[in-house]
Image: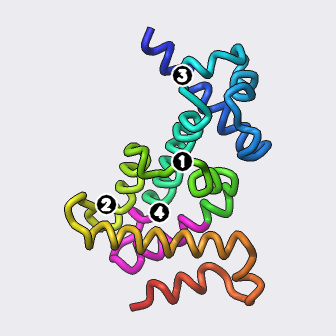
Amino acid sequence: MNDVVDDTRTRLVDSALRLLREEGLDAVTLRAVGDQTGLSRMAPYRHFADKTALLAALALRVVTDLSAHVAGAVLERDGRVERMRAFYTGYVEYAMEHPEEYRLVFASDFLIGDHPELEAAIDEVMAALGMEVTCDQAASKAGMMALLSTAHGLAQLAAAGHLSHKGISHTDVIDVLVTP
């Protein structure tokens, strides 16, 4: 029975992802996801307490995908500078190629800190970069947030067209960020 519940939950998240990509964040509702999945409109309510819970599950999927994309690029490189370049490049490219998913993670009505599974997915990328993240080391957490803040700001500027307006690309900015 538990496999059936997990399978249905996975199907619901898959449907939510399709809706997000095809129609945008506002289209992702529990009822629409139920319709998209071919289940009753009430079926999602048996798996998610509310829309926020559905969005958190969807955000986990997106963060996991983003993390896998970035970690894959980072792990192919040697040396801290090349790993940082791969991190920033992978992060910005993912944000630009998946704008609705990216918007969900950073513009939704829930805080990522309220969902430990989301934080754990992000911590995996930091570990791949060689930045150990531990709960009792403020410098470690500050380093992680500095890296994420820079990547997020760069992704936002690139997506909004501010970089191209200035005649530069995100790789130009990345070169400045990673040059020792």
Residue beneath the point at 67% across and 63% down: 96
Circle 1 is placed at which residue position? 110
Mark carried by residue 16: none
Q: Earlier in the sequence, mark 3 or mark 4?
A: 3
- The image shows residue 92 at horizontal and vertical percentages of 59, 68
Q: Mark 3: which secondary structure?
A: loop
**CA separation in Å, label 1 and label 2:** 25 Å
**CB under 8 Å between discs 3 and 4:** no
Q: Name the quadrant containing residue 156.
A: bottom right
**CA separation in Å, label 4 and label 1:** 28 Å
Foreground: 25 or 76?
25
Q: Is residue 79 above or below residue 4?
A: below
Amino acid found under the numbered disc labelled 3: His
**CA separation in Å, label 4 and label 2:** 14 Å
> Which mark's residue is nearer the viewer, 4 or 1?
1
Q: Name the quadrant containing residue 152.
A: bottom right
Q: Find the magenta span and give its range.
A: 73-92
Circle 4 is placed at which residue position? 73
Amino acid found under the numbered disc labelled 4: Ala
Amino acid found under the numbered disc labelled 2: Ala
Q: Earlier in the sequence, mark 4 or mark 1?
A: 4
Which colouring convention does the figure follow?
rainbow
Q: Earlier in the sequence, mark 3 or mark 2?
A: 3
Circle 3 is placed at which residue position? 47
Q: Mark 4: which secondary structure?
A: helix
Crowd band around label 4 with a 10 angstrom C-alpha radius: few (<14), some (14–19), many (20+): many
Foreground: 109 or 62?
109
Query: Relative to residue 135, is residue 162 drawn left or right?
Result: right
Crowd band around label 2 with a 10 angstrom C-alpha radius: few (<14), some (14–19), many (20+): few
Q: Name the quadrant containing residue 137.
A: bottom left
Q: Is residue 24 above or below residue 33?
A: below
